[in-house]
Amino acid sequence: MYEVKRVAVAPYSGVITPAAAEFLSGAIDSVNAPGGADLLVIALDTPGGLDSSMRVIIKAMLASKKPVAVYVSPQGARAASAGVFISMASPLVGMAPGTNIGAAHPVMLGASPFGLGDKDGKGDKKKDPMEEKVLNDASAYMKSITQKTGRNVEWAIRSVAKSDSISADEAVKTGVADFTAADIKEFLAKADGFSAGAFGRLRAANPSVEYFSQTRRQSFLATITDPNIAMILMSLGAAGLFIELYNPGLILPGVVGAVSLVMAFYSFQTLSANFAGVALILLGFVFFIAEIKVISYGLLTLAGAASMLLGGLMLFNTPSIGGLSISMHMLLSTVVGLIAVVAALAFIVMRAQLRRVVTGIESLKDKRGLAKTALSPKGKVLVEGELWDAESVSGDIPEGAEVTVTEVEGFKIRVRLAK
């Protein structure tokens, strides 16, 4: 019997990214350290994530000298894609009612969102060599870890090859999960007496429970490494720089824009974003900036929007276990938002260019003045508190008469007798 007096719970909800791997592998290291808990329970709710991050977690689980259980919770949660692999690597799996597990088929992030180029002339899907390699590798990995933990190998392989997904009750019936439990208290009660693989049967009668929580750094990194958040940061950065370029000296928009862009690029680098996708997005920004400076009446804006859309679709094409993608709604909202910002700035620039000059010499046109000398036709005129050389275009004008400026030529003005 394996005595369990202390239990540590590591709750994680979200995409499996490097931040998730750092948190969960760190929790495993903590329970294996001297004075650590006897059992670690990963309370998991994930749509999937990066293959590399998933493997870091699984390596830590399999190397652990203490049992690492997985509890798919709370109710309504899921262990999809990378979450299936993590669950299958555990010697003890529980699921809350209303949860599901499955759909572990590898995907190419951001690839062929509209199904373009994936069919032959007969309408059948072509087998991409890279995707086939990734699928075979994922299937072999799933088979390996499932055999080690003694779970349902046949279903596990099917979840990879066919994206099969099942409910909590079905998971228990098919040997994918060990039991269902409404909360952590019930989970531990049902775990008492269950076999945890090489660790033997657990004796978990009223153990103390403690919880791990992510550090602020881990929470922050987990947030910004979400592809949708990264796109928002990219957009904020672009908008900030647009405003700063339009009105230099505001400082705040430029600072916010620069910081947002740095965080976005960090996120893209962490998520192994495609260089061509990033380049297309940056090219879109260049088109938007050019629209403000050149005013192409919308042509550069359309080019920028198209470039950003293509870049967003191409941004992620690295093999993954799924769960990471840019929402089409988010991508469209981002592009529309930037178009609105660019259109507003372009409108302001255009209006300023078309507006009548209100300062300087040219602003004297149509202003009224006073003839300080007789104009026959030349003389001196006082306009806006300044004395000007003037020439009459309406015949002789007597001294003291009120005049109207009709034209400005260099430092001379032409006037007529005011009506």
Image (spheres, rainbow, N blue to C red):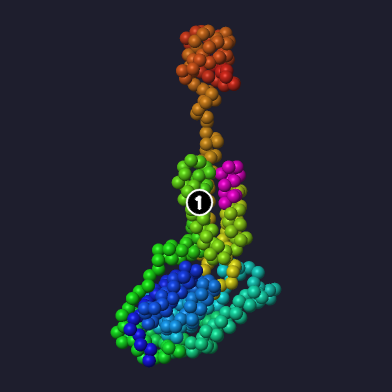
Q: Vertical placement of 46 versus 337: above or below? A: below
Q: Quadrant of residue 6?
A: bottom left
Q: Quadrant of residue 200?
A: bottom left
The span shown in magenta is 285-296
- The answer to whether 197 appears left or right of 108 in the picture is left
Q: Vertical placement of 70 versus 216: above or below? A: below
Amino acid at the residue labelled 1? Ala
Task: For residue 177, say whether it is visible.
Answer: no
Of residues 400 and 159, the one drawn nearer to the viewer in this rendering:
159
Of residues 30 and 120, the one drawn nearer to the viewer in this rendering:
30
x, y percent for residue 160 = 55, 81
x, y percent for residue 320 = 56, 72
x, y percent for residue 109 = 57, 69
Q: Residue beneath label 1, please? A: 258
Crowd band around label 1 with a 10 angstrom C-alpha radius: few (<14), some (14–19), many (20+): some
Residue situated furthest left in the rendering? 206
Give the residue displayed 53% in from the left and 40% down from the top: 349
Give the residue displayed 61% in from the left and 44% down from the top: 296
Name the image quarter holding the N terminus: bottom left
Q: Is-magenta flag for residue 150?
A: no
Give the residue displayed 54% in from the left and 24% down from the top: 361
Q: Is-magenta flag for residue 292?
A: yes
Secondary element type, mark 1: helix
